[in-house]
Image (cartoon, rainbow, N blue to C red):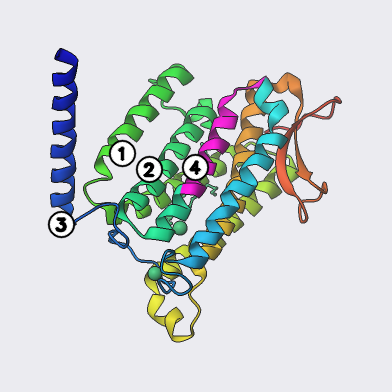
Amino acid sequence: MTIVLITLDTCKHRFYFMHIFQQGLGMANVFAYQSSQIDWCEDNFQFSEKVAEFYNTISSVSFFISSPIMMYLLHPYAQKRSRAVYLIWVMIMFVGVFSAYYHMTLSYFGQLLDELSILWVLAIGYMLWFPRRHMPTFIKTRKSFSLIVFLAALLSTILSFFKPTVNAYALNCVALHIIYVISLELKRCTDQRIINLAIVTVAWWFVAISCWLSDRLLCGFWRQINFYYLHSFWHVLINIAVVHGTTLFAYFDAFYEIPETNPEVKYWPVDSQWLGLPYLAIGDKDHLRKSC
Ligand SMILES: CCCCCCCC/C=C\CCCCCCCC(=O)N[C@@H](CO)[C@H](O)/C=C/CCCCCCCCCCCCC
Ligand SMILES: [Ca+2]
Ligand SMILES: [Zn+2]
């Protein structure tokens, strides 16, 4: 009897919460097609009445192509360092699924799933890779740093319900902080391969964010020339930037935390910076340690 009452009570609160949630947004149904307050430049329902933005939906698939490849390539590093490396890429697969669902429906629920999954990937990235020596001095261990990041992500999750239109801009600002951290790391780095990787990472991000901003802010212009694919380009370009960025942070992390493994950046399938995807390999030979 008690269990039934508790269940009924929880359900009542859940419905009450959903009611406030929907009333607050002035929407009939958060799952409904086009209930999101954001609509990307691409024409809606061009090819099917089930898929709102076809190219934006299809390009989201790129996240679940890169993720299994990176999990496979990073296997030796994850074994030595932490299984959380796999978690990052599993979460990025979820980002891909939620992003596809969001662009397919343009629902408010889809938007939140997309944004919150990105927020939590970033949070796990910070917990795992934020360089120890740049942590505030009052934080003594990675465990306490992770707790603070966790609480900040939790608070941001709650805040994200209040003004949904600013969430994406706020997430993009985190990328600026990541670039700042990269610049701090590069100050003590003399390995030209790593410096090149950092430059290429920021370059991919720059092209990606230019597409994102242009799609958001200059849609009128792009529509005039019937070219509204910029957000789908962003999906692919940010995916490439994330592959490069995560490899860079994995390298910094391994260099300081597990130096005995001789970490080395390699490229797959061809070991060329121009033709391959970068990943962190665990070295099997002694090579000259450069300073970064
Ligand atoms: C100590 C730092 C550790 C860094 C770890 C980096 C981990 C990677 C994190 C995030 C994955 C981002 C995946 C992007 C998904 C895009 C889905 C999407 O398009 N969503 C849009 C709606 O469809 C939405 O408007 C976009 C919101 C903004 C997302 C901002 C992502 C920031 C990505 C940071 C990338 C870092 C790469 C290196 C930067 C120089
Ligand atoms: Ca649209
Ligand atoms: Zn998108």
Label 4 packing within 10 angstroms: few (<14), some (14-19), many (20+): many
Instruction: Give the numbered dot on residue 148.
Output: none
Quarter residue 246 falls in: top right
Q: Residue furthest top?
A: 2
Residue at the disc numbered 3: 26
Instruction: Give the numbered dot on residue 157.
Output: 1
Is the C-beta of the residue carrying label 2 under 8 Å from the nearest atom of ligand 1? no
Type of amino acid at the residue the image marks with label 3 = Gly
In this rendering, would 129 be left or right of 161?
A: right
Q: Residue at x 19, y 57 (%)?
A: 27
In this rendering, would 273 be left or right of 285?
A: left
Label 2 packing within 10 angstroms: few (<14), some (14-19), many (20+): many
Quarter residue 4 falls in: top left
Look at the numbered disc 4 and give the secondary structure of its residue: helix
Residue 180 seen in the figure: no
Among the two numbered marks 2 and 4 on one chain, the one whose residue lies closer to the N terminus: 4
Residue at the disc numbered 4: 94
Q: Name the one closer to the observer, 237 or 136.
A: 237
Q: Is residue 51 above or below residue 153?
A: below
- Real-space CA distance between mark 2 and mark 3, rounded to the nearest whole angstrom: 21 Å
Label 1 packing within 10 angstroms: few (<14), some (14-19), many (20+): some
Type of amino acid at the residue the image marks with label 2 = Leu
Type of amino acid at the residue the image marks with label 1 = Thr
Among the two numbered marks 3 and 4 on one chain, the one whose residue lies closer to the N terminus: 3
Residue at the disc numbered 2: 116
